[in-house]
Amino acid sequence: MTVTTMWLAVDRSDEDNGCLRVVRGSHQQRLSELTEDRSTQNVLGAATHRDSDIDPADIVDLVLEPGDVSIHHPNIVHGSEPNLSDRRRCGLTIRYIPTTTECTQKEQPVMLLQGNAVPGINNYRSWPPYRSGSDFSWGDAAAWNADRFVNDDDEAFFRRDPEEIRQEIVDETLGFVDMLGGRA
């Protein structure tokens, strides 16, 4: 698995609001098989290990300020405690993969940022077009639209009403939050 994961902190992420925790040295171990585990509520519903298998002395809390980025090796054992504070912990996960690495979760959007697609590996999504009046403007918006990667199969999505797209994003995000018990 060739992937680099970056997590960009939007809010301060610390022990009180469930910051990322990694197991020191686990990136040097062979990747464990992911097995379904619904015994605790988490984003994946799966686990690669049991907490009792980890020496607590090897756990490192990654405290991040807004704008800080953590970069992860794909094999590192990681997780977080629940956010029991009154503060939000928000971040953006970005994964970079070469065109020879297949994303096995087909519902996840994969974007081609550089290079050429390898046939049969991934279905790359269109880069979203700049929409005057809907998006923040910048000096080179016209060049963006002229040069962006286009997948004809998903261009219809971008021709929809911007308010409809915004509402769909809100609904999907809140549905995910509800699934995790965040608005209960």
Image (tube, rainbow, N blue to C red):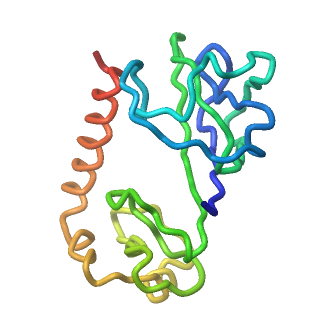
Q: Residue at x 52, y 17 (%)?
A: 83
Front residue of 84/102: it is 102
66 w.r.t. 94: above or below: above
69 left or right of 164 in image: right
Task: Say if 80 sits above or below 91 in the image.
Answer: above
Name which residue lies at 40% across and 81% down: 120
Residue 129 appears in the figure: no
Q: Nearer the viewer, residue 4 or 27?
A: 27
Q: Name the residue at 44% across, 66% down.
A: 110
Query: Going by the image, does 171 lie left or right of 53?
Result: left
For residue 27, above or below residue 21? below
Asked which quadrant contains residue 19, the reply is: top right
Q: Position of residue 111 (x, y in %)?
A: 47, 70
Rendered position, 143 above or below 180: below
Residue 60 location (% of width, % of height): 77, 25
User: Which image quarter is the C terminus in?
Assistant: top left
Residue 174 drawn at (x, y percent):
29, 34
Q: Is residue 42 something one can see in this rendering?
A: yes
Q: Where residue 140 sits in the image (x, y, percent)?
A: 55, 79
Instruction: Choose between 49 and 57: the one closer to the eye.
Output: 49
Residue in the picture at 39% in, 34% down: 36
- Indicate the quadrant where residue 63 lies: top right
